Amino acid sequence: LESWFHRLTHFQDLPHVADAPGGKGVYTADTELMLATAQCIVQREIFDIKSLSEALAATYGRGKAKGRAYPETMAVLLPQLQGGLDYRKVGTYLTPEGHTQNEGLTRMLPIALSFRNAPKEVLKDAIRGALLFSTIHTTVIGSCFAFANAVTMLVKQHPDDFEAMEWVEDILKDNECNDVRARLQLILRDAKSLGGGRYRVPEETVEHLSESTQTEAVEALAISVCVFCEHWDTPAQAIIQAIHMGGDTNTIAACVGAWAGALHGYEWIPGEWYSALENGEDDGRDCIVLAAVQVAAYDFFKPGHIKNNAKPIKYKQGLYKYQEAVKVEKKFGAKETIYSGY
């Protein structure tokens, strides 16, 4: 794309795009599922796994009608949810250990933002719950937690203070998944400094990090980290480079874009990228912007968010919500907080 236009622009006029299902400027199913996740959090004002599963199942029908191409795994699992299969059993519907695909990565962004001040274990528990109706695989959980955890770090950091390898080290430190750790360690070992806190991962290392088209969650995560480490200071260029990587480019670009937004905000987004997007009434461009603003305002663990010594509580069904300490003591016993089970 860059070789054609020297920067990514007027993408709606590129060959074949106009003939794609749904027409010009149509975003992907991954984005639609991320939007549904954000809207569910905003509308319910809690993190409710059962309601989230129902929202995503309902979204599937609308997305198919608009020609969105769903990942093979979700094209199987979401109809099972629609058909009434218990959301706690869908994650093992394809295989007992759960699938390893990357479909869950980008829809973790609203969860990362609304849990950005939560303890790491609570964030990981929320990620695990949000994946429950698609997979229970430990590598996917670890990859999605690494992506979300990276967002929580960047949203609190000023670009002037950012150093890519320190960021990678922090992601590694918080992650217990062996597959994720091995790839992050390889990046730390082989990355070459470009100065200014930027690092380039050699091509042979990149090829070793991802032996497929990044459809595996851990591979998509690793390639996204490589791109961001080199181009974090020029976010628009980072998106272009993510697309240059080939493979599952929409996931790589979405992960890199999420991190760029967390670190830099939104002012860098070129107007031509924004203006060409579809803008339907219920799920178009303006809805995405509104959901982003609303989710950014949520912080379930912000000190002082609720008065009277509020405590974050997780119910057995997978609900997160603040309640006043006195109500907590009446319902669960003094200072009891439930963090296990769905």
Image (spheres, rainbow, N blue to C red):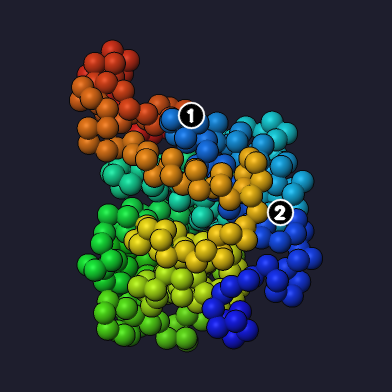
Count of labels shown? 2
Q: Measuring 42% from the left and 58% from the top, which residue is drawn there? A: 266
Reply above or below: 266 against 165. Answer: above
Q: Measuring 27% from the left and 27% from the top, which residue is drawn there? A: 306
The answer to which quarter of the image holds residue 60 is top right
Residue placed most toward the observer, 237 or 142: 237
- Going by the numbered disc 1, the residue's amino acid type is Arg
Q: Measuring 67% from the left and 57% from the top, which residue is drawn there? A: 26
The 10 Å Cα crowd at callout 1, few under 14, some 14 to 19, many 20 or more, is few
Q: Which of marks 1 and 2 is nearer the N terminus?
A: 1
Tag 1 residue? 44
Q: Measuring 69% from the left and 31% from the top, which residue is drawn there? A: 84
Q: Residue furthest top?
A: 330
Reply above or below: 106 against 286. Answer: below
Left or right position of 78 against 304: right
- Going by the numbered disc 2, the residue's amino acid type is Arg
| Residue 173 appears in the rendering | no
Q: Residue furthest right?
A: 19
Which element is circle 2 on?
A: loop
Residue placed most toward the observer, 298 or 221: 298
Mark 1 to mark 2 CA distance (whole Å): 26 Å
| Residue 84 appears in the rendering | yes
Residue 97 at x, y percent in the picture: 56, 50
The circle drawn on residue 68 is 2
Left or right position of 204 against 187: right
Residue 41 at x, y percent in the picture: 47, 36
